[in-house]
Amino acid sequence: MTEIPSSKGGPREAWITGIGLATSLGEGLDAHWDALNAKTINVDETTFAPYIVHPMTKLSFDAQIPKKGDQRQMEAWQRIGTYAAGLALDSAGVKGNAEILSRMDMIVAAGGGERDLAVDSSIVNANIQGNADPALLNERLMNDLRPTLFLAQLSNLLAGNISIVHGVTGSSRTFMGEESAGVDAARIALARILDGQSDIALVGAAQNSERKEMLMLYEFGDFNLKNKFMPVWERDNGFALGAGGVFLVIESKEHAQARGAKPYAKLTKVFSDHARRKNPGDVTAVLEGLWSKIGAIGENSAIITGATGAAPVTAEERAFLNKHRDIPTRATATPFGHVVEAQFPLGLALAALSISRGALFPPNDKTGVEIEMTKAPSQIVVIGAGHWRGEGMALVEAV
């Protein structure tokens, strides 16, 4: 288990001062808050049938990526992430501030880049027909792939594009590892701020759900939700991929106050773990261990979880939640789908948004797992359990 180190110079606070959201529900904080309170769910059950996705809302990329040349050399997931990063910088009031951006750390959680499906299909079809000799494979890879595909596939190119477009030129880190990458991006950012190694950081991830090769990949593991959409707690197995770009600006209290920034909330703790998942109950036990690390929770508390719907991990997470049934819970996968690397940043963003609005958005569940909350939340625990590996937990609190 990895724990945040304490500050060498005394206790520090990390404030969330900027939130950038672009998902299937819309873009910006007001649009998302309205959609969540209206219990809106946008899914596409036909384009990739029998598989279900939450498609990205229509974005005017010029608003955050003004140069068409920059847009053209990015794949969809990079455009989504760069767009959301711009929203976060706007939200924090640091867009265009060269002095702050030059020392802003950036930590991005990213998956593998997109592929050229036409080339992949030609190679697979040749193999089926018995024509996949090494010479043909080399010919296809050398002659058919476009020169810029390499740029689309590099995981750290999202961070690179954010730097190019928005001028964030402090230290840069990219973590790979599906859901765990999002947990560690937040954990490392918080650790550096609390330890005085960083004053301000841009943290987040992006996911494009409308990718046939990813649907194929997850189908090999029997992870896809098929045929008909249903809320996450009603599923026996399966997740619907969700499109989303989620970025947060996190900074020290002192840094925020010095520039007159107002916080949405403070990020107090982030922990990560890695259950062996060899025996039933392993994930439940790890979540209980993380919960004990979070510490005492007040009566005006809530839980936001990225529970995916995948078996058996969601059932084990539900067993954990059953031990804390008095705490209102919300699952992000019902309205947003599973956004993979962006799962944990999304939970943090919604926690900070809810605290800043003085309310928890209503439940979107008929099973009873999610209950109403009438009081303003002062603490929200964010949970992220990966569909295959990795668990994380964070505490977001009112300032």
Image: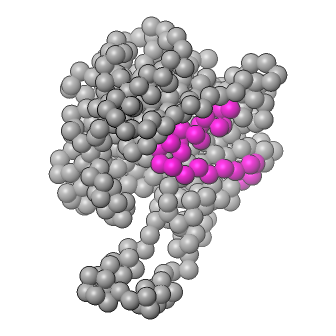
Visible in this render: residue 97?
Answer: no
Residue 196 screen position, x and y as percent? 78, 30
Question: What residue range appears in magenta?
Answer: 167-191
Q: Is 346 placed above or below 398 here? A: below
Q: Is residue 60 magenta?
A: no
Residue 17 position (above or below residue 150): above
The residue most toward the front is 279
Q: Position of residue 25 (x, y in %)?
A: 37, 43
Image point (58%, 69%), residue name: 151
- Residue occupying image coordinates x 71% and y 44%: 105
| Residue 333 rendering spot, x and y as whole percentages | 34, 38
Q: How is the image coloured?
A: one colour
Of residue 377 and residue 64, the one placed in the foreground of this image is 377
**Looking at the figure, which quarter contains the C terminus?**
top right
Q: Is residue 181 magenta?
A: yes
Residue 159 placement, left or right of 30: right
Direction left: furthest residue: 227
> Residue 136, located in which quarter of the rendered image?
bottom left
State the image quarter where residue 95 is shown.
top right
Q: Position of residue 85 (x, y in %)?
A: 59, 47
**x 49%, y 9%: residue:** 298
